Amino acid sequence: MMKSVKDVGQANLCIGCGICEAMASDQVIKIKLGEDGFYYPHLNEGLEKQEPWQEIKQVCPGMLVNQDQTLSTQDEKLWGPIAQSWVGYSTDPEIRWQASSGGGITGLLQFLLEKKIVTGVIHIGKSLSNPLTNDVFLSRKREDIIRNSGSRYAPASPLTSIIKILQDKVEKIAFVGKPCDVAALRAYLKLYPQYQEQIVVLITFMCAGTPSMKGTEHLLKTLKVSSDNLQDFWYRGKGWPGKATAIDQDLREFSLSYNQSWGTILNKHLHFRCKVCPDGMGTIGDITFGDAWIEENGYPSFEEQEGKSLIIARNNQGKNFIEQAITQGYLEVDNYYLNNLEKIQPYQAQRKKLIASRILALRLTGLFYPQFSGFYLIDNSLSVSIRENINGTLGTLERLSDKNKFNYFVFKIFSILSLTIQKIGKLFKYFK
C-alpha cells in the first residue's frame, strides 16, 4: 500500500511531473534527478508530516489516471474521444520549420497569445543553462513559444510551479505537457475547481514515452560529442521529422536522423511507467497533436519533408479553439479520418492493446500498479490475439525478473505455462 510519494518513486511509477512538489512546496518535496537519469520526489526528512499525501494520491499519475468520457465505437475506445480531427500545419513558415511536426501546437499557441485568449503558456523548453536538460517556461510572446517548440526527449517536470501561478488570479493559461502531466493537472483541477477558469486549454501530444538522461548520453556518445564541448543541442525540428543535432564549441555540426536517434537509441531508455501507460494518445487533454506521418506501403515514412501535424480535438472546447485558429489564418488544415491512423501510429495502437497484459504481470508479481479507468483496456486487449497478450505479459515479467528472485520465479512459471498454452493453441488453431 502506498503511503507516500517515496513509495511511488520506489515502485518505479513516478514520471516526475512535479505535481506533488507544487502541492507540498519545494521545502517539503523536491523533484530531483536520480542516478538512472529520471526525476524522483525527495522528501525533506524533517518535514515528512507536512506531505499532503491524501490529496496528492488523488492526482498523482503514478497512482491513477481517469478518462471520464463514455465511448461507444471501437475507434474511440482505441484513440480516445474525438470531436473532430485534422491534418495541418502552422501558416507561419518559421514555426512550421522550427517545430517538430508542422508546428501545429506552436501555431495554436501563437493564435491564443496574439488574440489575448490566454496571457501565458506553461510548457517545457531547452534549459538556458544546459542544452541537454529541460526547464519550465511561462511564455508570453511569439519568439518565446518558437524558442520552446520542438520535442524534448528527456525528463521534465512541468507542474512544479503550477499552483503558485494559479494563485495569481491574473493569469489565463494554456498548458502544454505530456499526457501524464495533463492527467495530473486535470485531476488537480477537479480537486480544486476554483482554479478551473484560469486554465483555458489543456494541450498534449501523442507520447511514446520519456527516455532517461542516459538515453541522451548514449546519443551524444554515438555522435562522438562530449557534453563538456557542447554549445547547442536539439532532438528534432528544423525540418520534419528533423535530426538530432549537436553543435560543439568549434561550431561543428553532428547529427543523426530521427529513425536513428529515436528508433535505435532513445526508445531503448524509456521509463518503466511509460511501458504500462494507457494514454500515449493523449485522450485527457482538450486537444492532442501528433506526427501525421506519410504512409508508405502500410508503414510511416520518416524521410525529411515539409511538416504536418495530426490534430485531434477531444471536446467541443478544443474544437472551437482549432476552428478559430483556422479561421484567423494561423493553421492550414484538411479533415482527417481515423481509419488510416493505425498505419501512421502503429506503436501507439499496439501499446494500447497490450496494456492490460502488461498490468497483469504487475499483478502476478504482487507489485503496485496504477489504477486506470475509462481506457477500455480489456476491450482493446480482445482486439489482438491470445499469443500477443501472453507475450505482452511475458515481456513485462522478464523486465521485472531482474528486480528480485520472486519476480524471476514468477517469470519462469509463467514462461512454462505460456509455452504450454501456445502449444495447445497451435493444436486447436485458435491463435491469430
Image (cartoon, grey):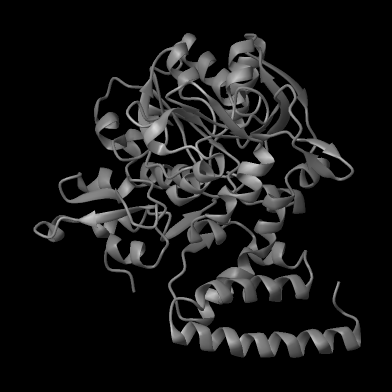
How many numbered marks does the figure carry? 0
Residue 330 picture quarter: top right
Residue 21, percent across and down?
26, 47
337 or 99, which lies in front? Answer: 99
Residue 333, percent across and down?
73, 20
x 65%, y 85%: residue: 415
Residue 42 picture quarter: bottom left
Q: Does 388 sit left or right of 171 as displayed?
A: right
Residue projecting furthest to the left = 46
**Residue 92 shows in the view:** no
239 or 311, which lies in front? Answer: 239
**Residue 180 shows in the view:** yes
Residue 356, percent across and down?
62, 68
x 65%, y 19%: residue: 323
x 59%, y 12%: residue: 94
Q: Does 252 sit left or right of 426 as displayed?
A: left
Residue 337, percent across and down?
80, 36
46 or 243, which lies in front? Answer: 243
Residue projecting furthest to the front = 250
Q: Does 270 sit left or right of 25 as displayed?
A: right
Which corner quadrant holds the C terminus? Answer: bottom right
Which corner quadrant holds the N terminus? Answer: bottom left
**Above/below status of 329 relative to 406:** above
298 or 22, which lies in front? Answer: 298
